[in-house]
């Protein structure tokens, strides 16, 4: 029979771009860890904290009053040191020094790439939680922070629509998502936009111009959602190309930017983060490792890191159809 590693002391950290709901996930990991009799430590500043040994003990009361807060109590970073073999060796030395025998890593694909290497090189049991607004991880229907980010962006776009219609303008609104279009597509449908540009589906600018025209002549105002990673080069570039074809159009550009990353997490993100935080501790104690915990079709599932970061989750093609029907 396979011998399960004995887990007595776990470390939890957040890494990469922060996302709303990370605090709720930390809270769940700490409380479930303590309830299971584990010692729990917070690692400050992502992998850098592990490399430098910035570790603090966390108990159930240390995570009071954070479920509703955006950002991350443990702070976050993208670590250059952990990308090196020597950095990971130092991180392992920190774990040995503090007697930590398991990790919960909350972040996105960069975080899991590091966690996978750490597991392969040092055999450290590690479970990942999908914490990113980008929603770009296979193995979970949604990531922690995505729902809040989309709601924040849609609220902003609703305001833009008010002023767009008052002035008969075309607005190009750029949203985040790195090299993916999950946020952009959801925003486009939810905000009733005329068109969306995403990296996964390059579009023809002439089609975009036709769409702004509408089925019964030029619309008085239009909203075009542009994913930051789309191939034309972003909202400003696209707007210039459209202006060249529609010289009389009154065009404005808004880049929503990091506003999408902050703010109090939505109910959906709080629940997802809470479920996954508990699941991560359960998974470690049951002897699992090198995997991300996610929720698919309402159920907790573990997906190996290699799959979660290696496979591309497809965009929902039905949403494109719905958008084009409703934008007529
Ligand atoms: O991965 C989250 C994300 O917000 C992306 O959508 C965006 O491309 C990137 O991080 C921005 O990173 P930074 O905060 O380093 O500017």
Image: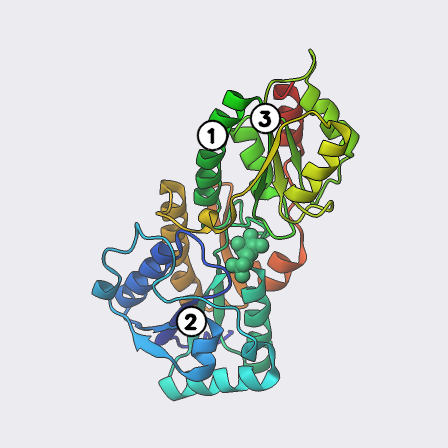
Q: Position of residue 244 (x, y in %)?
A: 76, 33
Q: Position of residue 80 (x, y in %)?
A: 57, 76
**30 is higher (above) or lower (below) than 192:** below
Residue drawn 59% across the image and 22% down it: 221
User: Any mark on residue 45, and which?
Assistant: 2
Q: How many numbered marks are there?
A: 3
Residue drawn 60% across the image and 67% down it: 113
Residue drawn 63% across the image and 36% down it: 316
Q: For residue 302, say whether it is visible.
A: no
Q: Residue furthest top?
A: 216
Distance Cα–Cα, label 3 vs label 1: 14 Å
**217 is higher (above) or lower (below) than 38:** above
The disc, 2 or 3, on the residue closer to the chain's N-terminal end is 2
The disc, 3 or 1, on the residue closer to the chain's N-terminal end is 1
Q: For residue 193, say whether it is visible.
A: yes
The yes-or-no answer for disc 2 within 8 Å of ligand 1 is no
Q: Which residue is mark 1?
A: 158
Disc 3 and disc 1 in contact, CB within 8 angstroms: no
Q: Which residue is mark 3?
A: 169
The yes-or-no answer for disc 3 within 8 Å of ligand 1 is no
The disc, 1 or 2, on the residue closer to the chain's N-terminal end is 2
């Amino acid at each position: 029979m396979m011998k399960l590693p004995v887990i007595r002391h776990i470390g939890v950290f957040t890494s990469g771009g922060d996302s709303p709901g990370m605090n709720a996930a930390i809270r769940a990991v700490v409380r479930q860890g303590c309830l299971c009799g584990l010692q729990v430590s917070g690692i400050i500043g992502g992998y850098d904290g592990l490399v430098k040994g910035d570790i603090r003990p966390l108990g159930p009361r240390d995570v009071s009053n954070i479920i509703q807060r955006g950002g991350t109590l443990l702070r976050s970073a993208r670590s250059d040191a952990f990308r090196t073999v020597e950095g990971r060796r130092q991180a392992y030395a920190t774990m040995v020094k503090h007697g930590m025998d398991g990790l919960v890593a909350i972040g996105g694909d960069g975080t899991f790439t590091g966690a996978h290497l750490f597991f392969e090189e040092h055999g450290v049991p590690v479970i990942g939680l999908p914490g990113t607004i980008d929603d770009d991880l296979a193995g979970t229907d949604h990531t922690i922070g995505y729902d809040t980010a989309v709601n924040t962006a849609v609220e902003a776009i609703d305001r833009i629509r008010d002023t767009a219609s008052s002035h008969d303008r075309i607005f190009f609104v750029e949203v985040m998502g790195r090299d993916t279009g999950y946020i952009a597509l959801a925003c486009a449908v939810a905000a009733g936009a005329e068109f969306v540009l995403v990296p996964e589906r390059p579009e023809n600018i002439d089609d975009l111009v036709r769409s702004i025209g509408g089925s019964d002549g030029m619309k008085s105002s239009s909203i075009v959602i542009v994913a930051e990673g789309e191939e034309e080069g972003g909202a400003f570039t696209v707007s210039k190309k459209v202006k060249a074809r529609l010289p009389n159009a009154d065009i404005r550009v808004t880049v929503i930017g990091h506003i999408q990353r902050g703010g109090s997490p939505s109910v959906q993100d709080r629940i997802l983060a809470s479920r996954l935080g508990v699941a991560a501790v359960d998974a470690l104690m049951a002897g699992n490792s090198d995997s991300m915990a996610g929720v698919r079709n309402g159920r907790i599932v573990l997906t190996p890191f290699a799959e979660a970061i290696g496979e591309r989750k497809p965009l929902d093609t039905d949403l494109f159809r719905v958008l084009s029907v409703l934008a007529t």
